Image: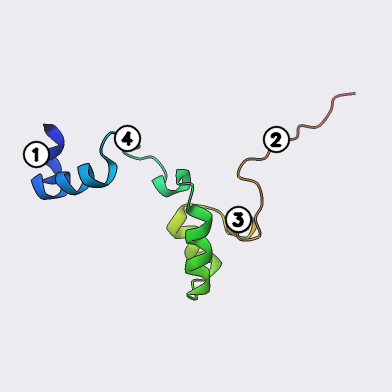
Amino acid sequence: MWLCAVLGPKLVKEYQRKFGGQKIWIPKKGTALPCRYCPHRERHLRLLRRRGWSAQRLARRFDLTVKRVYELLQGAPQFRPRRFPSRA
C-alpha cells in the first residue's frame, strides 16, 4: 500500500478510522490551497476572523483575494456567473 509508505502505518490507521470507505480527493501538486474546495471553508474563515486574523492574512492563507474574503465573510455565493458585455 503506497499510502502506508508515504504516511506511515499509524497515520493510515487514523485515516481509516475517520474516513474508511469514503472517497477522498487529493489535489495535484501546484494546485491552489485545497481548502478552497472544503465545504467548511467559510466557517473556518469566520472563526479565524473572530480570532483576530486580518482580511489580508486570510486571503494569503486561503489563496483568495481580499475582496473575495470579504464576500465570503458576508455570505456571498460560492460561484457567480461571469457577465460579458453585450454586442449590439
Cα separation, mark 4 vs mark 2, equals: 34 Å
Residue under the image location 46 percent in, 59 percent down: 60
Kind of element beneath mark 2: loop
Mark toward the start of the polypeptide (2 vs 1): 1
Residue kind at label 2, given as amino acid type: Arg
Q: Position of residue 29 (x, y in %)?
A: 31, 38
Residue 27: x and y, percent?
35, 37
Mark 3 or mark 1: which comes first in sequence? 1
- Specify which label sits upstream in the sequence, 1 or 4: 1
Residue at image location 90% in from the left, 23% down from the top: 88
Q: What residue do we see at 53% from left, 55% from top?
A: 42
| Tag 1: amino acid | Ala
The quadrant the N terminus occupies is top left
Q: Is residue 30 above or below residue 73?
A: above
Q: Is residue 9 left or right of residue 36?
A: left
Q: Position of residue 47 (x, y in %)?
A: 49, 67
Q: Which mark is residue 72?
A: 3
Q: Nearer the viewer, mark 4 or mark 2?
A: 4
Residue holding disc 4? 22
